[in-house]
Each structure stands twice: as C-alpha cells, then as structure tokens.
C-alpha cells in the first residue's frame, strides 16, 4: 500500500504537484493520466525518493520512503530516463536486477522463456 | 575560436596536473634545501612547459598515424643509440636542463616550443574540423568475461561483478586502470636516486602512490561512475551502505593487488618494501575512506565512454576534488612526520599502520557514517547527475 499525505513539490517558485491525500491499495491497478508537465513523472520520482518533496510524506507499506531504504525490498520501478546501464547486455542487466532481489539466473531464465 | 577554446581547455585537463606529482615534491625539497632561489622555479617551469608540449604531442600521436609511426621510429632509434653508442640522451637532457636553469631566460625556449606544438595541433584540427563530427558513432564492442568466481560473495559479488564490467568495458575507467599501472612505477623516480631515497618524507609520499593509484583516481569519483544510471540504482533493492561497501572492497582489493605487483621494489631492499606495505595498510584503512568521503561531495557526472582528455569531459575535474587532495596527501605525511618527530625510529611507520589497522577494524562504523553523509546529499546528487 502506498499512502501520500499533503504532498507538494515546487521547482524554484513554480508548484508542479499538490496532492492532499492519496492511497493506492495493495493489488490495485492505478492509472495516472495527465498533460505534459502535469507532474506524473514528478510523482513517481517522489514515490521512489529520487526527488525531495517540498511538503508532505509518502509511505510505502507504512515505511516512510525518505527515512528508510527498506521499501526498496518490495518495490520495482522503471522510469524512462537514465534507467539503463549502457555497458551491460540485456541479459546481464536483467540478471543484475534479479540478483539484487535474490533471484538466481536459472529462475530468471525460466521466467523469461 | 572554437579550436582555440578547445586547446585552452586542454591545458586545464587534470591529466596535465599529473606531472606535478613528479615535479612538485622534488621542487619543495629543492626549495627547502637550496632556498627560494630563482633556479628552482626556472627548473619547475621548464618541466611544466615540457609536460604541456607533451600534451599536444600526444594528441597528434593519438590522432595521426604518421606522427605515431615517426615517434615510434625516433624512439627506437633513440633507444638503439642509448644502448649501443657512447651518446646518452638522459645525460645530455640532464645537462640541457641544468644549463637551462642557470640561464633563466632559457625559459623562452620552452615557451617557443610550446607555441610551435600549439600551432601544429591547431593546424591539424583546423584541417579536420567540421561541426557534425560528434554525430558519427562507432559500432560498439562488448568485452564478455565470466565473473562466476564472484558468485560466492553474495550481494557484494553482484556489485563487484558490475564494477569490473564498468572498468573493463568503458573508455574512461580503462584510463583509470592504465594510470593505476603507471602509479606502480612512481617509486622508481625516488628510489633510484640516493638523495631522494634518503629523504623519508619523499619515500613515504612515493610509497603512498604506488598502491593507491586506483583507489585515489577511482574512489574520489564515486558515485559519479554510476551517474548515467544513478537514479535507477537508487530505486533498486540495495542500500547506500551496501553500495559504498562494494566500492570500498574494490579499492581494498586494488591496493592489495598493487602491493603484490609492486613486489619488484624488493630489489631496492626489504626496508623499502616494508614501507610500501605499511602505506598499503594505511591506504586500505584510511585512504580509501577519505576517497569515499570526498566522493560524497562530487556531483560532477562522468561520461563513461568519453576519454578524460583534453577536448572533452574537463568538467569531471572539480575544485572540490582538488581541495580534497590536500588532506589525502597531507594527512599521512602529517601522521608520519609527527610520530617520527616525537618518538623517532620506526614510530612514523607504526603510526601509519596503526591508523590503517584502526580503519579496517572499524570499517562497519565508518561505512555506516559515510552512508549517512551520502544519504543526506542523495537528492542533490541525483538532481546534478540527471541535469547533466
């Protein structure tokens, strides 16, 4: 479950995001739609603690994403920017991500094929 | 205008500061021993200008096959003459330098040669300069090596495997490896000369570099090596603590390997090698952590496949990193000097080994603390890497 309280983000003086309350339940399929610059990527970056919020808190399974790294154990994400490692082959890249999650090469192969 | 700008920036390249590592300690010793005489400064600037001339010459060698072949042929002839004839380039070069420092105006000769080499590179670039040259892309090759031997190291093995791939598959890290090998021979400059060999501070200075070549050049650029995908790493199932420990272990292994590779210094006596061993312990237990600490303030991204040469990526040289070289080099010298001054004997060496040992024993505590420092600057680091 992801819980967001009183979240806002400003770049310089420009407010790009303002969410009073949002709860995404476990297993829920959640679609986020908006125009360019509406703050979709910013919200994902905030949930992944890649940017610092101006105000508010984000909890991932009741873990504050800005105060602990434990949420990483049960979170997977892929954002379009800077998410590929150029010097790894696709196979090595997938292995790297899988190994970080404790999945071995054989298991990964069985998932892919 | 663009070419002039490129050439000027090339003079500020960090690689042109490497010769300083050779001249600077010797210049300091000369000034201490001979006073602030004009000769010492003339000598220093002569050599500095020669290193800048080499900067342009190496560029031509890199880019022009004819210059490369001519240089190799001249080198071969030179080595042949050196070995098989009475004439010695080394001795005559030394005489020329000695003559030059007696006549301060001779510095004009070095400036003149620098101007000629500058003009040569300028003409070379001008003849080949076109604005869309950056668009051409060479087909990429990938070095495939198995790192299954790291499988037994658990999660740290996963990071080490990736770091080794990073080092072996990208242009910029390969340069670091090359420099690390060159640093192995740094001691030869000092240990082969009696006057320097007897100066304990210079011997310590040289010994520190022999095993710290990699950890210094690589460590101070952590986490910038991963800047191209740093956001991705920060969302994966790894903590800053694990990330830093993998980097530290890589540096520790590099120091250990350098120590083994530098065993040829035993030819200069076991005392010299003992000093190298002592400074290696210091490099693992203190130096590597200082490098990681300085990395926490490094927010200049690195383009992995752009050579850190003259014409690009000069941004990777930050003033912060330059300032950190003072404690990096000064701290061990200071520890040695103080202990040696107070207790004498081998106290200086024992102190270095003692602090190195302390660092290794308390590595968990130090890494935890470093992780906190890195975490505090995490958002700034990601923003800087993404922005660039």
Image (cartoon, rainbow, N blue to C red):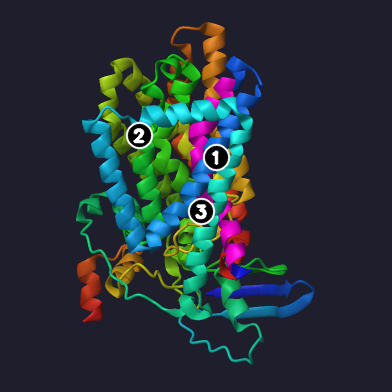
SS category of the residue bearing label 3: helix
Residue B294's place in the image compared with B267, above or below, is: below
Query: Which residue bears the numbered disc 2?
Result: B185
The local secondary structure at tag 2 comes to: loop
In the figure, residue B198 lies in which quadrant?
Answer: top left
Q: Which residue is mark 1?
A: B48
Q: Nearer the viewer, residue B89 or B21?
A: B89
Which of the two marks, 3 or 1, is nearer to us in this view?
3
Q: Residue at x 29, y 25 (%)?
A: B265
The residue positioned 38% from the left and 59% from the top of the image is B62
Where's the C terminus of chain B, which quadrant? bottom right
Query: Which image quarter: residue B167?
Result: bottom left
The answer to if B21 sits in the magenta stretch is: yes
Rendering coords of residue B82 (x, y %): 28, 33
Q: Residue at x 43, y 51 (%)?
A: B242
Can see residue B32? yes
Characterize the local packing of mark 2: few (<14), some (14-19) or many (20 or more) Cα atoms within 10 angstroms: some
Discs 3 and 1 lie in a common subunit: yes
Q: Which mark is residue B371?
A: none
Instruction: Return the chain for callout 3.
Output: B
Question: Left or right: B181 with respect to B14?
Answer: left
Characterize the local packing of mark 1: few (<14), some (14-19) or many (20 or more) Cα atoms within 10 angstroms.
some
Does residue B140 lie above or below B307 as drawn? Answer: below
Q: Secondary structure at mark 1?
A: helix
Disc on the earlier residue, 3 or 2: 3
Q: Nearer the viewer, residue A80 or B53?
A: B53
Q: Nearer the viewer, mark 1 or mark 2?
A: 1
Range of the magenta residues?
B3-30
Q: Quadrant of the N terminus of chain B?
A: bottom right
The residue beneath circle 3 is B117
Q: CA distance from mark 3 to mark 2?
A: 28 Å
């Amino acid at each position: 479950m992801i819980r967001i309280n009183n979240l806002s983000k400003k770049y310089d003086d420009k407010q790009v995001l303002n969410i009073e309350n949002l709860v995404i339940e476990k297993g829920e399929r959640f679609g986020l739609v908006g125009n360019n610059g509406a703050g979709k990527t910013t919200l994902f970056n905030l949930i992944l603690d890649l940017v610092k919020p101006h105000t508010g808190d984000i909890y991932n399974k009741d873990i504050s994403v800005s105060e602990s790294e434990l949420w990483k154990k049960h979170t997977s994400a892929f954002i379009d920017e800077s998410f590929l490692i150029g010097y790894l082959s696709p196979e090595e890249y997938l292995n790297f991500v899988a190994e970080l999650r404790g999945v071995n090469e054989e298991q990964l192969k069985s998932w892919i094929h | 205008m663009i070419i002039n700008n490129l050439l000027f920036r090339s003079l500020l390249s960090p690689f042109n500061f490497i010769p300083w590592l050779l001249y600077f300690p010797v210049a300091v010793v000369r000034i201490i021993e001979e006073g602030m005489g004009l000769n010492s400064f003339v000598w220093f600037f002569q050599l500095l200008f020669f290193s800048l001339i080499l900067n342009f010459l190496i560029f031509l060698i890199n880019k022009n096959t004819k210059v490369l072949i001519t240089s190799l042929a001249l080198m071969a002839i030179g080595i042949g003459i050196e070995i098989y004839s009475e004439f010695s380039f080394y001795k005559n070069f030394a005489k020329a330098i000695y003559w030059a420092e007696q006549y301060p105006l001779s510095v004009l000769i070095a400036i003149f040669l620098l101007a000629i080499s500058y003009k040569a590179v300028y003409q070379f670039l001008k003849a080949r300069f076109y604005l869309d040259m950056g668009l051409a892309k060479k087909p990429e090759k990938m070095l495939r090596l198995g790192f299954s031997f790291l499988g037994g190291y658990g999660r740290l093995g996963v990071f080490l495997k990736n770091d080794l791939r990073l080092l072996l598959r990208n242009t910029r890290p390969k340069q670091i490896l090359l420099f690390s090998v060159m640093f192995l021979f740094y001691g030869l400059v000092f240990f082969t000369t009696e006057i320097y060999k007897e100066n304990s501070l210079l011997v310590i200075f040289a010994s520190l570099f022999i095993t710290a070549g990699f950890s210094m050049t690589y460590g101070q650029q952590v986490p910038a090596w991963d800047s191209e995908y740093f956001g991705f790493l920060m969302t994966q199932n790894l903590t800053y603590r694990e990330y830093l420990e993998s980097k530290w272990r890589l540096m520790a292994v590099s120091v250990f390997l350098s120590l083994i590779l530098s065993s040829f210094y035993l030819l200069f006596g076991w005392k010299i090698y003992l000093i190298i061993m002592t400074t290696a312990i210091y490099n693992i237990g203190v130096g590597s952590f200082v490098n990681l600490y300085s990395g926490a303030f490094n927010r200049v991204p690195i383009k992995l496949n752009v050579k850190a040469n003259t014409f690009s990526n000069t941004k990777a040289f930050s003033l912060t990193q330059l300032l950190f070289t003072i404690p990096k080099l000064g701290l061990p010298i200071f520890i040695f000097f103080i202990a040696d001054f107070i207790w004498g004997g081998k106290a200086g060496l024992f102190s270095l080994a003692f602090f190195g040992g302390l660092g290794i024993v308390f590595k968990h505590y130090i890494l935890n603390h470093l992780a906190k420092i890195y975490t505090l600057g995490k958002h700034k680091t990601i923003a800087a890497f993404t922005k660039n």
